[in-house]
Image (cartoon, rainbow, N blue to C red):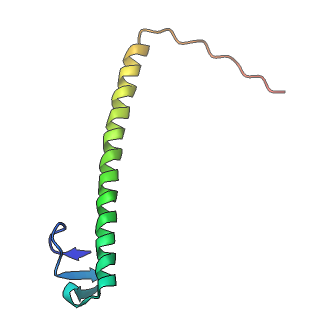
Amino acid sequence: MFDGDFMAQPEFLTIDNQRYAIANLDDNARAQIVNLQVVDNEISHTQQQLAILGTARAAYLSALRQVLANVQPEPEVAQTTH
């Protein structure tokens, strides 16, 4: 969406296939751009957190499977319907 470095204010904004010079936008438009950058950063952070949590979950599941390898499973109980 932005032409330029994320951390630095870009010179141009491309949205809906239209290019706009940031210097020509009013304060409200610039504030919305900052809001978008903050939200994009939070989305990226959340995606990273989800990846970390997914990795941790896989490790815990693997550890549980190793522990359960030494445990005799309970026999399945037939379910009755009324």
37 vs 7, left or right, is: right
**Residue 10: quarter of image:** bottom left
Residue 4 image point, x, y percent: 15, 74
Residue 31 image point, x, y percent: 31, 77
Establish if 73 lies above or below 51: above
Q: Quadrant of the N terminus?
A: bottom left
Residue at the spot x=23%, y=75% of the render?
2
Frontmost residue, 49 versus 16: 49
Q: Quadrant of the C terminus?
A: top right
Establish if 43 lies above or below 35: above
Residue at the spot x=50%, y=8% of the render?
72
Can residue 3 be seen by looking at this rendering?
A: yes
Name of the residue lying farthest toward the right: 82
Q: How many marks?
A: 0
**Residue 40: quarter of image:** bottom left
Frontmost residue, 77 versus 34: 34
Residue at the spot x=19%, y=87% of the render?
23
Residue at the spot x=73%, y=22% of the render?
79
Can residue 16 be seen by looking at this rendering?
A: no
Name of the residue lying farthest toward the front: 27
